[in-house]
Every structure is written in structure tokens, then in C-alpha cells.
Amino acid sequence: MTCEVKEKGRVGTINPIFTCQPAGAQFVSIGIKDCIGIVHGGQGCVMFVRLIFSQHYKESFELASSSLHEDGAVFGACGRVEEAVDVLLSRYPDVKVVPIITTCSTEIIGDDVDGVIKKLNEGLLKEKFPDREVHLIAMHTPSFVGSMISGYDVAVRDVVRHFAKREAPNDKINLLTGWVNPGDVKELKHLLGEMDIEANVLFEIESFDSPILPDGSAVSHGNTTIEDLIDTGNARATFALNRYEGTKAAEYLQKKFEIPAIIGPTPIGIRNTDIFLQNLKKATGKPIPQSLAHERGVAIDALADLTHMFLAEKRVAIYGAPDLVIGLAEFCLDLEMKPVLLLLGDDNSKYVDDPRIKALQENVDYGMEIVTNADFWELENRIKNEGLELDLILGHSKGRFISIDYNIPMLRVGFPTYDRAGLFRYPTVGYGGAIWLAEQMANTLFADMEHKKNKEWVLNVW
Amino acid sequence: MPHHEFECSKVIPERKKHAVIKGKGETLADALPQGYLNTIPGSISERGCAYCGAKHVIGTPMKDVIHISHGPVGCTYDTWQTKRYISDNDNFQLKYTYATDVKEKHIVFGAEKLLKQNIIEAFKAFPQIKRMTIYQTCATALIGDDINAIAEEVMEEMPEVDIFVCNSPGFAGPSQSGGHHKINIAWINQKVGTVEPEITGDHVINYVGEYNIQGDQEVMVDYFKRMGIQVLSTFTGNGSYDGLRAMHRAHLNVLECARSAEYICNELRVRYGIPRLDIDGFGFKPLADSLRKIGMFFGIEDRAKAIIDEEVARWKPELDWYKERLMGKKVCLWPGGSKLWHWAHVIEEEMGLKVVSVYTKFGHQGDMEKGIARCGEGTLAIDDPNELEGLEALEMLKPDIILTGKRPGEVAKKVRVPYLNAHAYHNGPYKGFEGWVRFARDIYNAIYSPIHQLSGIDITKDNAPEWGNGFRTRQMLSDGNLSDAVRNSETLRQYTGGYDSVSKLREREYPAFERKVG
């Protein structure tokens, strides 16, 4: 029995796991303070991405469209971008950063977005907004390349490339979190705080979880500032926690300013968090404090309560963002569980060379399949027609009907998780995330035992 | 001047013609905003695209079909699981969606071969399904794939399957409305008349422009069946593909959403001489009138009357319980296309609400015409609203509730206006007599939410209220100003239906009416 990596055999997609590149760029856009992105394409490319952000966070985020209509598709639509920038800047006086995010349609018709930006910088911005700081940033994210994951990666690089300057090197690090939740950012900043390390956090999205205030003044928006982004050029190291969601930016900074790039690991589980902290220590010289040893101990204690008795041998399928899936699989192995099927939803050719996947291939002692370019049918077909037996599914809400129809308990994790309340508040990373994940997996299994009356009496005493 | 200029839109003067405040004594000629024009780029409009109008709104509610989008995965993913159009076949169309997964090499070399492989794969994965719809997207429209040719080719090779093609790329029109039109026309051109149905009764209708949101269609079809009417097809909610191929044999097209589906009704009238009857399933009076009109058309008014009498007796006391408590509450009625005129007058008349604003994202001027005609003086009407205008309007009007979509609802939440989902509903269905009570109940629950009361309190202030006890009930908040007669009424009561008012309809048996013609 071995761990096998293969690409989905079918050409088509039955129930996609990922959406396309512009969504990733839009997620980057909402993480930056005073920023509203303009998506250059049909209106649906924005409307539905805004909808899914609002499904996940139960908040609304501002993103604009160039509203490509038929005439633009035929004659070119650069003028729509020019008009959109003008209208947006005129009506949103605080906006300073405007990513121009391309889509399949505008890449196919060949609109020269970089040229438009040059024209606007020399024309409109000088003439109409002479005293205003405005950054127009081209993001080329055609939908027929990569996925939301690579779109995010490209967009982080584009932002960093636009802003980063080497002015006065300092002791900060750059923390590229990848596509995570507010709860993750909070946990990561907590770890850095305990280590006494300052960071430029890309992106400060804790504020996505915003209040209703009596005066109605609160809005949900990211808080990474232009100053933070400029400062990425001064940092002593860049930590790209997710290999596929930040590496391009980290490599850019390394090449341009010789800032060491530390890629991964996604700090999911105790072991990966340990590695992250050790990497921080190596890069900054700061010791790992007792307080974190204490937190780590609390987490280990929580896991010890669960692993042998409940989690051992449980067969798990995991799908979603590659770094999340791999991180969860690694953590499951530490918890004595058996991830048997990992589904990565795009055709990134680099997956096979991922050292973590190679390590799985070398060391897993039971049958594990890793499917790239996967869709949900890869999971459902195995359950329905090929006898795959599972105890648990880990993944986002789009796969909910597999759990429901085949009566397999599922813990919602990743993006989006719209069919469960408030999950974005909780971390999956760090020691805190390890506790949350293990206990949620256990509670999900417990609820299922009771629902199915499957040795539910076990829980009387443990 | 009836046009309303938003402060936030002064820099885009053309917006001024898209909003009006209905003034005293003004007619539609004074107060009609422009509609269905190209969107102003960068305005943060709420409009969607023509692909979603065709595929997501109208195509996908068809229940026994493999719905494939020919393009990159995003269009498919993004429109999947964002609506509540259920069906009585375990929601097949909600659960499964298909993308041909067009990648860069296909953009360069063409994606027709890829499409064909996809079609074959999909039928293989779901051998029980023999029907398919294919939707063009921006990408495949621009590279010029001949989807129709591939569909024909497959149908020749696989005679047991039938495939419908809808060429409505995202950029085809100012909004989703362009897609509604395209799929209406494509369906009648390609599919109507290709199946001969079994006619089982004297009175045969197509139910058109109805998408079975939370079971609306099943509620309405229940009434039709109780009247002895055969529903040949529903366009499209809970509708079957082959039923919709047989639309040409109906005696009457009963049209619900005129914005999205009047096109096919008009074509059915021209091509097959089938009359169109516009109805309205929302509200006691509009619904009763609608059933009566259908009854009159077929000469079975007595059957309609029996249903209306029974339903009104059952549900009116519950509707009125809410009406007493909703009197004068201000509503922003901000739906997508046509609900502004379906709902405007009837929520005022039957629930006591006051509509202070209507808007439409993708409606045409005709929708505004009807909407404004049904509103009172002072109502602010907005075409193709955008984010800032919406906020400015909320600040100006201070409504007690907003009826709008999921994401704009989150915007309203932040400025402390409770929202109800006008597209997917909160706890629907909202059609039917019972459904209308459910709607009133949801509005009441939103406005009188004790949490909403808490949200307005600044706890840092010395004059913040001291609560005394640890709770408020909705009635403690809603009943303070009611007369004793209303408060203690023995006839009025709160909603007594269950959480699921639809599933039981699927088990129901219907009376057999003797046929007059063989």
C-alpha cells in the first residue's frame, strides 16, 4: 500500500472545488486598506465573488466592475477601465489603491491594461487628481489559467512588487499568511507577539469580523496599509506560510532585495507550528518563550484526551486549498488518523514536487490517494461506485451534499464555510488552531455517533 | 423636478436620470427613471451578467437536467449553491453542476473537442439523466466555439439524449436581464414542439416565470391541481425538460414573473396562439384575483372560489395579527427585477407597511412604470442602484426594514437596518396564502428582533437604558401601542404552520374532475 499522486482522469469538472483566478485577486484587494479593486470583465465576475465573500463572512466587501458589455467585447474595452477608475476615485475620496483585475474575457480580447494604467497615470491622475496618492496596479488573472489559489499568489506578488522599497532595513518580518480567516491572522499575530517579533502582515484581515455599532459606522475591510506594503522591502525575512499563496511575492522580495524567503510550512498542527516558531527563532534570533511552551502544553493535553480513544484509525477525505489540505493531512497523521484521499482542485504542475507530498509518498504505510485537478466527483464517485469508506470529511461548504447524501460526518474548514455559523472566527493554525481542529473533529464524530446510535454510550465516560 | 440627485453621484451626472421621488400629483410621465441602460463602470452597481441571467436564474431550476457551462470553472462554481430553487427530485439541479474547464490551451486551439468529451463524461457519470443544457460563457463566445454543432453531433451519436444550447455570454447586455431574454428565445426556437404530451384534463396550462424558490411553484401548482387544471410545464422551477418541450399544447400560459419570462409567453402566443394571462402568487387579493381569472378563463370559477374561501378563512386571521403590528413601518423594497411591483401595493394594503423606496437592478422601464404607479407619494425609486446611493438612501429614509439580496443585506445590517432576503426568502415559501403569512411573520420577526433593539444602544453612555430584566420578547416590543381590543383579540393569531410547509404537498391526492372533452 502506497501513497499515489495522480491527475483526475476526466477532462471535465463535475462540481468544482475551486473558482477561478480573479476571485483570488479580489480577496487580496479587500485585504488592503483604502483599496477597491476594479475587475475588468463581465459583471458576474464581481457580483458572485462579492456574494461568496458575503456568504462566508456574513459581511459585504466593496469591489467594482468595469461592466464589460457587448460593444466592449467586440471593439475593446480599455475605455471602460478608464471610466471606472475616474468614477471610483471621484466617489471614494479615501481610496488610494486600485488593482485592475483582468478576467478571461478581457485577456482574450487583449485589452492592454498595463497601457491603460500608464495612460491614466500620465493623464487622468495628473490632471484630475493631482494632489492625491493613487496606485493603479495591474493584476493579470485570466480565468483559464490556474485557479483562485494562483490568482491569490499572483495578486500578492503584484501588490508587493508595486510597493516594496528598500529604504531603511529593520528587524521586522514579512508575514504572508496565505488565504486564511480572521481567526488565523489573530492566532498568528498572537504567536509573533509572544515571540516579540514585529511584522508586516499581508493581509490584516482580522477586521473582516466587524461589529454592528450604534452609530452604524463599522464596515468590514482589510487593514494592511500602504506603509506596511512599502515596508516589506525593509524586512529581514519573508515568511510565506502557504507555499501556493504567497511564494511568488516572497521570491520577488528575495530576488529584488535579498530578503530571505522562508516558504512554509503551513502551521497547521503542533509539529508544523513548532517548525514555524523555530524558523522565526532562526530568522530573528528571538527565543521561543515559556508562554508558548505553556500554550503548546495545553494543546498537547487537549489532543492527548482525544487521539487514541477517538481519532485513531479514522479514515478521512480532505479537499480544498492545497496548503490547507496538506497541512490537515499532516496533522491528521500526528493524530493517528488516516487521511485516505486528498483532493487538490487545480492542475498546478508543482504539486508533484512539493516536499510535503514527497514525504507522504515516502512514509505513508497505507493506501492514500492524492488527486490533482480534482473535482467533487472524484470524491463522490469513489464513495458511490467504488466502495470508499470514510469516517470523516474535511473541507469547505461546496461539498456539503456529499456529506449529507452519504451520511458521512464533515467538519467545515477552509473557504468558503457558509453553511456553518462563524467558523471564520476560529484558527486552524498555531497551537490554538490545533486545539480547535482536533476538538471540532471529535465533536463532529460524537454528534454522528449519537445521530446514528453508533456506540454513543461510549461518551458516558471518558 | 421629480428626478432625485444623490449627493454621492453628483460627479456622474447621468445617474440623475435613474432616480425619482414621486411628488404630489405627479404622473408617470413626470416621474419615470431611465432603465436597462449600460452600467456606469466603477459605480459598484449590483448587477450581474447575462450568463447568470440565463443559466443561473432560468436554466438551472430545471430539475432533471445536466447543466454544463462551457468555459473556465469560475462561472460554474460562482453560481453554484447561491440560490434556493428546490425540486421534488431531491434537488438534483442544486447538487450537481458541470464546467467544461476551459484552460489556456483550449483558448488558443479551440475547446469544441473538450466540450464533446465533457458531454460524454457527464452522461456517463449520471446514466439516469438523458437531458442536458449547455451554457456559453464569455470565454467560449469570444473564441467562437460552435456549441450547437457539437450538441447536434452528440445527439446523432447518442439518440437517447437531448441537448439544449444557450448562447448567452456574460457580456451580452447591460445586466442579467439580457440572459433572460436569450434563454427564453433559445428555448422556444430549439425545443418547444419537439415532444407531444399526454393531455389528461380539459384545462391545460404552462406555468411560466416561476422558479420554485423555497417551494413557491409547488404551492401554486397545488392550487391549480385542486382546480382540476393540468400543469403541462413550469418554466422553469421544479420543471422537467421534456415537459417544457411540450409547451405548445397548453391552452393558456399563466405568467408569474413578467420580467424574466414574458418573452416566451409572447412567442407562444404568436407561434401557437396560446393566450397569456399574467398572475401574481404574492398577496391574498392578487392571488385570489389570479385564481379567479384562471377559473373564469376555463369556466370553473366555482372551483377557484372554493379554494379562495377555504384558504382565506384559514390564514387571514394570522395575516391580520401581523398587519396590526406592522402598521406604518417603513420599507425599502429593493429586489432584483419585478418584485417591486409585485409587492409594492400589496404589502401596504395587506400588511400595513409603508413603502418608502423601490429599486430594481435589472428591471426595464416597464417594471419601474408599474412599480411607481403602485407606490405612494414621496417614494424614492432607483434604477440600477449602486453601493453609495443605497447607503445614502438608507440614511435619508431610515427604513424599519429592507427587502433585498443577501449581500446588500449585509450592507444594511451595518447601518442597523434589518434585512429580509427578497430573492431567496428567509423562511419561505412566500407565495400562496400561507406563504404570504410566512412573509409577514418574517418581516415582523426582523423588525421586532430584541437583538435589533440592543444594537442601537451605546453602552458607554450614562443615559443608556437599564434593562431591569434580562430579556425582551418580540411582543413586549410590538404590542405597547396596540389597543386592548387588538392585543386581546380572540380571532387574530400568530402563524401556526410548521417549519416546512412544502414537503407535505408532495404527498397530496387530488380530486378527479370528469372530462367534458375526450
Image (cartoon, coloured by chain):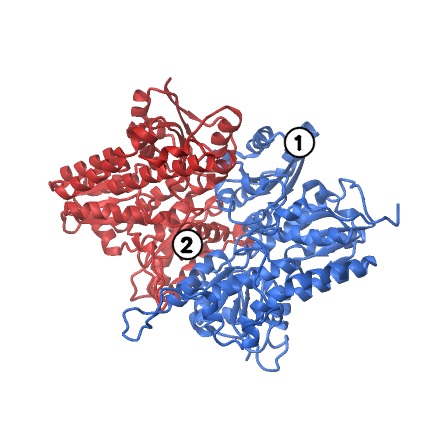
Chain colours: A red, B blue
Quarter occupied by the C terminus of chain A: top left
Judge left or right: residue A140 versus residue B81.
left
Please name the amino acid that badge 2 sits on: Lys
Q: In this rendering, which labeled residue sits more in front, label 1 or label 2?
A: 2
Q: Name the residue under label 2.
A: A58
Q: Residue most toward the bottom? A: B25
Is B511 or A337 nearer to us in this picture? B511
Mark 1 to mark 2 CA distance (whole Å): 45 Å
Q: In this view, does A329 lie above or below A36?
A: above
Q: Residue at x 71, y 60 (%)?
A: B310
Chain label for disc 1: B
Please name the amino acid that badge 1 sits on: Glu
Is B18 or A140 nearer to us in this picture? B18
Chain label for disc 2: A
Q: Is mark 1 on a helix, strand or loop?
A: helix
Quarter occupied by the N terminus of chain A: top left
In terms of image quadrants, where is residue B32?
Answer: bottom right
Q: In x, y percent, where is residue A99? A: 36, 53
Q: Is mark 2 on a helix, strand or loop?
A: loop
Q: Residue at x 67, y 44 (%)?
A: B507
Q: Residue at x 22, y 45 (%)?
A: A174
Residue under disc 1 on the same chain as residue under disc 2? no
Q: In x, y percent, where is residue A309? A: 32, 30
Marking on residue B174: none
Marking on residue B153: 1
